[in-house]
Amino acid sequence: MLTRTNFVTLKYVTDNWGTDANGFKLVITSVKDPKHTCKDFTCSTTGFCIHPDLLCDGINHCSDNSDESVHNLCQSETTNTVFGMDVTWFVLIVVSLLLILSAIIVGISICVCRRQEDNTTNQNTAIQLFSIE
C-alpha cells in the first residue's frame, strides 16, 4: 500500500480467535518518491528512497528485498561463523587449545631434561664408586 499524503488509516478487524503462535507483522516504511533525488539508499526494483538505518535489519522494506541483500553492507550469518561456530568462540577455543598444547610441551620438556640430568648424576656417582673400589 502506498499513500501520497502524510496520513494513512489502517483498520484491523479480528475475530477474537488466535494463539501466541499465529499472528502477523505490520511493517510501515517511510519512503521518498523516486522522482526526487535520493541521498540515501535506493531500492532496486521500486526506486524508492529509504533511510540507511533500514538496511540489513532483517525486514524487507523495499518489497524486493534489495535493502537486505546489499552485498557490501549486509554481512550474512554464514560469514560470521567457522565450522558452524561464532568466530569469537572459534578463536577462543583455538587459542585455548594452543595454550594447553604449549603447556604440555613445556611439561614434557622439563621431565625429559630432569630425567637426563638424573641419568648423568647417576652415571657420575657410579663412576665415582667404581673408582673408589
Image (spheres, helix red, strand yellow):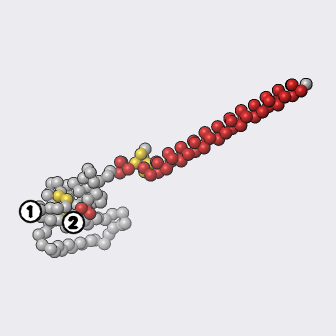
Q: Is 83 rendered above or below residue 14?
A: above
Disc nearest the viewer among 2 and 1: 1
Quadrant (top left/top right/bottom left/bottom right) for the C terminus: top right
Q: How many numbered marks are there?
A: 2
Q: Position of residue 88 (x, y in %)?
A: 44, 52
In front here: 44 or 53?
53
What's the residue type where badge 2 is placed?
Answer: Thr
What's the residue type where badge 1 is placed?
Answer: Lys
Q: Which residue is mark 1?
A: 35
Q: Position of residue 16 (x, y in %)?
A: 31, 72
Q: Which residue is mark 2?
A: 29
In front here: 85 or 52?
52
Q: Say whether residue 95 is left or right of residue 42.
A: right
Judge the density around disc 2: few (<14), some (14-19), many (≥20) Cα neighbours within 10 Å: few
In front here: 91 or 116?
116
Q: Position of residue 51 (x, y in %)?
A: 22, 64
The residue located at (21%, 54%) in the rendering is 66
Q: Residue furthest left?
A: 35
User: Residue 116 occupies which quadrant of the picture?
Assistant: top right
In front here: 63 or 108?
108
Q: Position of residue 35 (x, y in %)?
A: 8, 62
The residue located at (53%, 43%) in the rendering is 98
Quadrant (top left/top right/bottom left/bottom right) for the N terminus: bottom left
Distance, label 2 to label 1, CA atoms, is 18 Å
**Residue 96 appears in the rendering:** yes
Q: Is 6 rendered above or below residue 79?
A: below
